């Protein structure tokens, strides 16, 4: 008996230790593998060493937000090989100035907008792209944000090849850009369209450490992450490897420039600040020589990079050649408001009239909270319980998501109905836009971007089981955010797109 006692005690300890090891590993797995990813991430990472960052390109005018968006798209195309698989022979290069010209956010031109500086607009011939109201919106070239980029990419078929648009030098050339859709950068030009199935806002929720971790994992797994900073000509310091160290530590400053996070280095030091992001940029220049800076560091402790909810960390990923022929959308400006906190709105619906016999391909929807369950239905009538089809699932990360549909042929009116667990629905309505630059003639002034909506396009379902028209919807707790135009005219449209292709 004594011998058995001596051998069984160590055995029980081993079993106990084994149990705890399994428990710890299980916890790490069921928390999205955060335990392991935290330990596996290196102290230093440079995406360029994996050949997943396109070569440096310099922007003209105030288009940094577009260049940052497209670097993320291009990095994903390099990761997946979709670019070469689609038949492209040259390096990955998407046309930033096609988005610039046809974003859906710009007002018609005016001769007072044109000058010879880097922030020039276009003259009276420029028609603008805000077809909801051409007398309002951004002045072309003068800033934007990642929500505007997302609206363009998801309301059109996607980004197009740069080789089919004019090369515009850094100082800009209005003649090359062109005023009309029939000159310069063309609206249609036998393009192949590259469409992001996911646009994820990595810094929308969580602590600073959680955001940092999430963005690092995204860089390693998917590629360059779009972000922003307060751009300054002078660095805080120079790192041992010769790269400049930048960072904004002043809460009174405002974001004015978009960049890409392509890696990090935990060993970077500046005073008591530890660690920095590795950044690729399309505009910074070395003050002494005028040469493009290209790559530099931004401190982890920067107040905006990797932190701002909407501009801190956005990744455009799972980019594919657009698998659809047509996009149906009532929300020209994508997502600008949300219904969160309004107990009236339980689910939303949009009505589209398919112009011919077409096949459903997918639905584009926004989720504004992580791990958000959804139920998506297509109906012939909102008043009936029966559906053409119904899909249920869960969206892990806040952002835009493309949900595949069965290739079912259909013609005529169809209602797309969305029910989210968090009951927070994205919608477009007239708004004041805080762009990265501001507008002419007053620097830094928010710009009104007007939307429009028609009756019987969008609907919401309330707690009493009744459907209501969405076009004049105003959030009861957010009226102060709505511009006067949104209170005076129907401008609200749910951000819920339908994608189709011609039926065989």
Image (cartoon, rainbow, N blue to C red):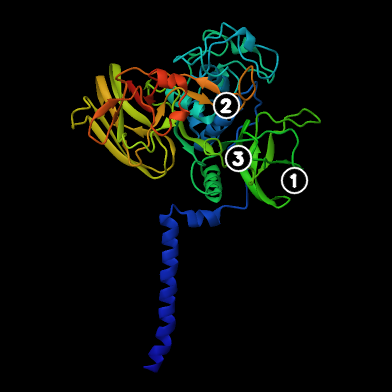
Pointer 1: what residue? 239
Residue 46 shows in this picture: no
SS of the residue at dot 2? Answer: loop
Q: Secondary structure at mark 1?
A: loop
Alpha carbon separation for disc pair 1 and 2: 31 Å
Q: Which mark is residue 378?
A: none
Question: What label does residue 435 carry, if any?
Answer: 2
Q: Is residue 60 above or below residue 280?
A: above
- Residue pushed farthest bottom? 2
x 51%, y 17%: residue: 102
Residue 450 placed where, x, y %? 47, 19
Rendered location of residue 36, percent (x, y): 50, 56
Give coordinates of residue 139: x percent, y percent: 57, 17
- Residue 258 visible (yes or no): yes
Which of labels 1 and 2 is toward the front?
A: 2
Q: Are marks 1 and 3 in contact (CB under 8 Å)?
A: no
Query: Label for residue 305?
Result: 3
């Amino acid at each position: 008996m004594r011998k058995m006692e001596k051998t069984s005690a160590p055995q029980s300890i081993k079993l106990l230790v084994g149990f705890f090891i399994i428990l710890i590993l299980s916890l790490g797995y069921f928390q999205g593998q955060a335990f392991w990813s935290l330990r596996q991430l290196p102290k230093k990472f440079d995406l360029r060493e994996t050949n997943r960052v396109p070569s440096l390109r310099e922007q003209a005018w105030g288009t940094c937000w577009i260049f940052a968006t497209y670097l993320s798209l291009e990095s994903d195309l390099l990761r997946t090989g979709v670019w070469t698989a689609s038949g492209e022979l040259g390096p990955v290069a998407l046309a930033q100035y096609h988005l610039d010209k046809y974003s859906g956010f710009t007002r018609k031109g005016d001769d007072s907008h044109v000058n010879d500086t880097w922030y020039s607009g276009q003259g009276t011939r420029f028609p603008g792209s805000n077809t909801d109201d051409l007398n309002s919106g951004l002045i072309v070239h003068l800033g934007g944000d990642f929500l505007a980029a997302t609206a363009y990419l998801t309301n059109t078929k996607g980004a197009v090849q740069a080789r089919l648009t004019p090369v515009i030098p850094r100082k800009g050339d209005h003649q090359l850009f062109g005023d009309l859709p029939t000159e310069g950068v063309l609206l249609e030009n036998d393009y192949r369209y590259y469409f992001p199935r996911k646009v994820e806002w990595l810094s929308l929720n969580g602590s600073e450490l959680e955001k940092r971790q999430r963005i690092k994992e995204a860089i390693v797994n998917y590629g360059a992450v779009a972000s922003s900073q307060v751009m300054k000509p002078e660095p805080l310091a120079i790192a041992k490897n010769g790269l400049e160290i930048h960072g904004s530590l002043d809460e009174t400053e405002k974001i004015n420039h978009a960049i890409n996070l392509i890696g990090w280095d935990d060993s970077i030091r500046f005073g008591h600040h530890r660690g920095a992001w590795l950044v690729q940029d399309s505009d910074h220049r070395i003050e002494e020589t005028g040469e493009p800076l290209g790559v530099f560091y931004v401190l982890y402790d920067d107040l905006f990079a990797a932190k701002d909810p909407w501009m801190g960390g956005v990744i455009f990923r799972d980019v594919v050649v657009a698998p659809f022929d047509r996009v149906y959308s009532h929300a020209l400006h994508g997502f600008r408001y949300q219904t969160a906190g309004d107990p009236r709105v339980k689910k939303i619906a949009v009505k589209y009239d398919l112009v011919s016999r077409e096949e459903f391909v997918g639905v584009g929807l926004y989720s504004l909270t992580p791990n958000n369950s959804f139920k998506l239905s297509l109906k012939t009538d909102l008043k009936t319980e029966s559906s053409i089809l119904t899909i249920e699932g869960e969206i892990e990360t806040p952002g835009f998501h493309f949900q595949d549909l069965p290739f079912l042929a259909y013609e005529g009116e169809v209602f797309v109905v969305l029910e989210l667990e968090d009951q927070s629905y994205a919608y477009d309505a007239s708004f004041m836009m805080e762009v990265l630059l501001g507008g002419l003639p007053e620097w830094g002034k928010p710009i009104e971007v007007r939307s429009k909506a028609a009756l019987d396009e969008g609907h919401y379902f309330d707690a009493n089981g009744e459907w209501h028209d969405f076009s004049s919807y105003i959030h009861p707790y957010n009226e102060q955010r709505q511009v006067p135009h949104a209170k005076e005219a129907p401008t609200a449209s749910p951000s819920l797109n339908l994608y189709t292709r011609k039926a065989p």
